[in-house]
Image (tube, rainbow, N blue to C red):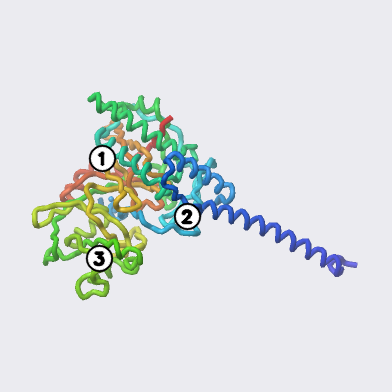
């Protein structure tokens, strides 16, 4: 008699199969639950030291890995938007993985998994060429100190900065990054106090004291690209008015603190904002404060660069920096006036880089600051770029202390803060001396 026709055997097979499915489902659920708990574990003990935060974070992320591992000219400015620092974390985002594997999961600005990369195809041990490092040592010290201070003061309330990033595939931890910043600060302070050229300009000193890790570009849309694209951004000075005039008729708005909670501002595109909804007679009148009025071109440059220096008609001037956006994504390739993303500003005391809220942003300096992928590459990574001018190699040092919509995610580009300029022509003239593509190296203290 056929086994398929035996009721007893059919019953036994059904029970066995059901039991196996139950066991497997239970194991999958348990693993998933553990991973979710680790991913959503709050980090709000602000009294703990930064080192304790880094250690706890690293331990947590390694556990998550085992539980739930997943197998600013021309086009430059069009692709670079201000930093997006206040997005809500998504409950279903993947865990922050501190991996000892060569594979690393890349996330977007909404903390959603996008793809995985092989770290060994992007990063490799190297040595610097014999060329003097160009850097303003005083400005570099300022940015290093401000970035290190951000880690110290905001590691608890901005856990994104404790992500180990792609360098973890080379066994570089967040603690290694902090040690690198501390060592460079110590060297610069000592050299400046002794009124001498800093040792950080000597490639031999760097090769002895740092791991030099070459960064090969990874561009999913251009597989042949090997060098990093070096775009450039700037702070522009623009005339403006405290009140609306016939010339200065485009507002720069600030959100009022008592109106932020309901997130009404996330409902409106840039075009709707500029249609007058916040002006007298508009349906949202009174919910925001106009900080200044610019030309439309002035507003677009402020939105694109993230910071603007306004020379007011009354003779005063002030810096303004992006604060919060309307939660709408920046679309690469779409012209600036058609973008739906809109930023609300605050007045600040200096050029500002990365920060999870407006009053915590890092004060940065031109010539030593890069904007990059803070979520996947990491904040505070020290980078050297190499290019050739007149047949001679040139090296320039800076810190990833800023980010932007073009870098979420982006493993093939850095944006160099070039300076403060009165207009686009002077900016373009200055950046002609800078390369469009560059060889890049990370420095990590040995």
Label 2 to label 1: alpha-carbon separation: 32 Å
Question: Residue 195, position in %: x, y?
Answer: 22, 25
Q: Is residue 190 above or below residue 308?
A: above
In the rendered image, which residue does mark 1 sit on? 367
**Element on which disc 3 rests:** strand
Going from N to C along the chain, the mark reached first, 2 or 1, is: 2
**Is 374 displayed left or right of 189 in the figure?**
right
Q: How many marks?
A: 3
Task: Tell me which corner region of the image, top left, top right, bottom left or bottom right, holds residue 198.
Answer: top left
> Residue placed farthest to the left in the image?
314
Question: Residue 348, position in %: x, y?
Answer: 23, 51
Q: Nearer the viewer, mark 3 or mark 1?
A: 3
In the rendered image, which residue does mark 3 sit on? 288
> The N terminus appears in which quarter of the rendering?
bottom right
On residue 114, the disc is 2
Seen at 48% across and 52% down, the residue is 42
Question: Residue 289, position in %: x, y?
Answer: 22, 64
Q: Is residue 382 above or below residue 302?
A: above
Question: Residue 357, position in %: x, y?
Answer: 33, 53
Seen at 23% across and 56% down, the residue is 301
Quick check: marks 2 and 1 in contact, CB under 8 Å? no
**Element on which disc 2 rests:** strand
Going from N to C along the chain, the mark reached first, 3 or 1, is: 3
Seen at 53% across and 40% down, the residue is 100
Q: Is residue 352 above or below residue 120?
A: below
Label 3 to label 1: alpha-carbon separation: 35 Å
């Amino acid at each position: 008699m056929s086994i398929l026709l035996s009721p007893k055997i059919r019953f036994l097979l059904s029970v066995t199969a059901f039991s196996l499915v139950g066991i497997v489902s239970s194991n999958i659920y348990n693993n998933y639950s553990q991973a979710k708990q680790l991913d959503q574990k709050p980090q709000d003990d602000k009294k703990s030291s930064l080192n304790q935060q880094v250690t706890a974070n690293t331990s947590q992320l390694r556990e998550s890995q085992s539980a739930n591992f997943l197998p600013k000219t021309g086009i430059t400015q069009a692709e670079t938007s201000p930093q997006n620092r206040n997005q809500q974390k998504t409950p279903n985002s993947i865990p922050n993985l501190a991996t000892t594997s060569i594979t690393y999961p890349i996330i977007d600005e909404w903390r959603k998994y996008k793809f995985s990369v092989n770290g060994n195809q992007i990063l490799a041990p190297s040595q610097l060429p014999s060329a003097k490092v160009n850097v303003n040592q005083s400005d570099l010290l300022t940015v290093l100190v401000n970035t290190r201070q951000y880690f110290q003061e905001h590691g608890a309330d901005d856990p994104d900065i404790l992500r180990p990033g792609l360098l973890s595939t080379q066994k570089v931890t967040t603690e290694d990054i902090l040690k690198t910043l501390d060592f460079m600060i110590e060297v610069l302070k000592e050299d400046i106090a002794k009124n001498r050229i800093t040792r950080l300009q000597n490639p031999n000193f760097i090769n002895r004291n740092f791991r030099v890790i070459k960064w090969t570009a990874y561009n999913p849309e251009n597989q042949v690209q090997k060098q990093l694209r070096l775009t450039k951004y700037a702070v522009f000075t623009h005339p403006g008015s405290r009140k609306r005039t016939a010339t200065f008729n485009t507002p720069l708005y600030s959100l009022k603190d008592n109106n932020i909670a309901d997130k009404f501002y996330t409902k409106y595109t840039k075009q709707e904002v500029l249609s007058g909804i916040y002006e007298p007679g508009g349906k949202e009148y009174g919910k925001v404060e106009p900080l200044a009025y610019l030309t439309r071109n002035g507003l677009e440059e402020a939105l694109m660069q993230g910071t603007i220096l306004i020379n007011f008609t009354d003779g005063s001037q002030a810096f303004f920096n992006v604060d919060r956006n309307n939660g709408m994504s920046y679309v690469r390739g779409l012209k600036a006036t058609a973008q739906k993303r809109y930023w609300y500003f605050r007045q600040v005391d200096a050029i500002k880089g990365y920060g999870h809220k407006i009053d915590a942003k890092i004060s940065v300096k031109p010539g030593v600051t890069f904007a990059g992928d803070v979520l996947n590459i990491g904040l505070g990574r020290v980078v050297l770029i190499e290019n050739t001018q007149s047949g001679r190699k040139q090296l320039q040092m800076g810190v990833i202390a800023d980010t932007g919509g073009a870098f979420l995610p982006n493993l093939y580009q850095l944006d160099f803060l070039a300076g403060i300029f009165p207009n686009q022509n002077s900016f373009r003239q200055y950046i002609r001396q800078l390369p469009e593509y560059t060889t890049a190296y990370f420095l990590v203290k040995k």
